[in-house]
Amino acid sequence: MSAQRKRTKIEQVNVLYDLFDLPTAFHKAGLVGLLLSIQSLKQRRILKEEDVNYELTPSALEIDFTESLLQTLMDDLYDAREVDVAVKNKWQGAKTVREPTPAETEAGNRYVYRVIQPMGNVLCELYPDEDGLWLKMWRDMLWSIPRGRPTTREPYKERAEGKPCKEGPRGWQYLLKVHAARAKGESFVAEISSALLPGAQAANAEGGAVRRPR
């Protein structure tokens, strides 16, 4: 039997994002979000200069992703907490956590529920007033449109419980597949969830595969 070759562990994966190659405005906005996240993590001293290596040009961003960097980015992106919300109408199937305070009662709220609230750490840096309208509008939009179904909120639930976000390991496996395909002169394309890209679908109503941009 021939000796089994040992696989070399991949420590980092280089990715070049070119504004002229990104297929949609959502992809370009996501690239801006990635850059803002990195800068915010540095400002908050969660990331050190040596933790991330990237080069920014007027039309492109080239970055060396590591497993730890990706995990840090995902944990910060999906960071969340549990908060109490006082409402006027009863939520079907949900349990109240306490009696409303006099101020909540005076405002007409009779029920108090505990919910998971996205932190939006990058936005909190830009808008320090966490109870302001801009952050509230962003949180309401997130919960109403891309994360409207409870099953799409799992990453936030993990972070609210103090756990690492599973999107980190999942994203790293995708990057490793990108690296492996690139070494063979091929390309790797993953399915995109509608929770990340509004309107995205893996298959159409007729059951046929939807062609995704490479």
Image: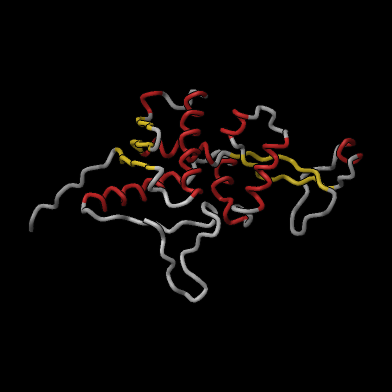
Determine which quarter of the picture holds residue 127: top right
Front residue of this view, candidates 112 and 167: 167
State the residue lying farthest toward the left. 1
129 relative position to 15: left or right: right
Front residue of this view, candidates 69 and 144: 144
Front residue of this view, candidates 10 and 205: 205
102 relative position to 19: left or right: right
What residue is shown at x 50% (from left), y 33% (from top)? 36
Above/below status of 124 relative to 8: above
Could you tell me residue 122's position as x and y percent?
A: 56, 33
146 relative position to 52: left or right: right
State the residue lying farthest toward the bottom. 206
**Quadrant that contains the N terminus:** bottom left
What residue is shown at x 51% (from left), y 59% (from top)? 200
Determine which quarter of the picture holds residue 67: top left
Could you tell me residue 183's position as x and y percent?
A: 22, 49
Could you tell me residue 78's position as x and y percent?
A: 54, 42
Front residue of this view, candidates 149 and 192: 192
What residue is shown at x 27% (from left), y 42% (from top)? 10
**Quadrant that contains the C terminus:** bottom left
What residue is shown at x 72% (from left), y 33% (from top)? 132
Above/below status of 9 relative to 125: below
104 relative position to 199: left or right: right
Could you tell me residue 194's position as x and y percent?
A: 53, 57
